Image: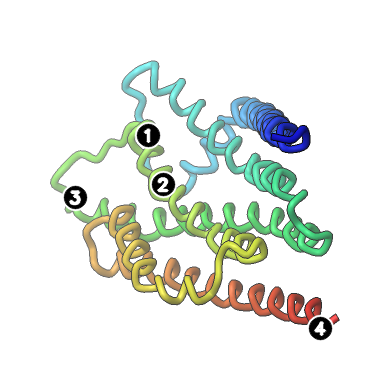
Amino acid sequence: MSESEEHIPGEKEMNVGGHLTELRNRLIVTAIIFLLFFIVGFINVKSIYQFFVDDIDMQLTIISPAEIIWIYFSLAGLIAFAGTIPIIAYQLWAFVSPALTAKEKRVSLAYIPGSLFLFVLGLVFGYVVFIKLIFPFLLSLNDDMFNVMFTVERYFGFLIKITLPFAFLFELPIVTMFLTSLGILTPAFMIKNRKYAYFILIVVGVLITPPDFFLQIVVAIPLIIIYELSIQLCRIIYKKKQAQHEAFMDE
């Protein structure tokens, strides 16, 4: 084996080690930003809590001291996660950017503000669906049979379980555009697997809504629209990439 051939494995190991070090540093930065947002959320928990309970006509109950800690950590964690979304997106972009062209870097960097916007939009949509449809429906099942009392932990736990899936699903257009710009995803793949995607979205809608057909349809339709929008965005990005490739080959 020649000297140059022996040198290649070592060089690859060094490159892998460098990538792992870079990844570790980016994770540390992300964790620090998350912690800072968490502290801000923790300090302002009372205002955040008041914002949410203003939309319900009842007093929530605490039945153990642990619930006080739980609500502080849950609301602060929610704020921290939402605030860290663009940081996570940027760190991901910065990690893969060396493999991108200058134009791909500029285009993909523009996805970062969109990721935060769509995440917040998903939270808002999920919250509106919960407050306007799901919660009133559940209360209507009581029909004056029971004395209604909700604990803080149970109410906010249920609220978070409903709103967070919407926030993640609303990220689908940005994720689709990003993966298409990297050449990982194609519109043909999304169209071919449309029926499976619809099935998954409907299952998600069923899981996060009460057993009422109308509510499940109300939730599933926006999710399907988001998937169809993602296909169109994927098609636009894919056509642009094809046009750029053809122009480069013609030169």
Q: Judge the density around disc 2: few (<14), some (14-19), many (≥20) Cα neighbours within 10 Å.
A: few
Q: Residue at x 47, y 71 (%)?
A: 190
Q: Residue at x 38, y 36 (%)?
A: 59
Q: Earlier in the sequence, mark 3 or mark 2?
A: 2
**Disc 3 from disc 4: Cα separation:** 70 Å
Amino acid carrying mark 2 in the image: Ile
Amino acid carrying mark 4 in the image: Asp
Amino acid carrying mark 1 in the image: Leu
Q: Where is residue 186 shown, x and y percent of the image? A: 55, 71
Identify the residue position indicated by label 3 in the image: 142
**Disc 3 from disc 2: Cα separation:** 16 Å
Q: Judge the density around disc 4: few (<14), some (14-19), many (≥20) Cα neighbours within 10 Å.
A: few
Identify the residue position indicated by label 2 in the image: 56
**Nearer to me, 219 or 112:** 112
Task: Left or right? Give the position of 45 relative to 147.
Answer: right
| Label 4: which secondary element | helix
Identify the residue position indicated by label 1 in the image: 60
Q: Judge the density around disc 3: few (<14), some (14-19), many (≥20) Cα neighbours within 10 Å.
A: few
Identify the residue position indicated by label 4 in the image: 250
**Disc 1 from disc 3: Cα separation:** 17 Å
Q: Where 52 sits versus 69, above or below?
A: below
Amino acid carrying mark 3 in the image: Asn
**Disc 4 from disc 2: Cα separation:** 63 Å
* Residue most extreme to the top: 65
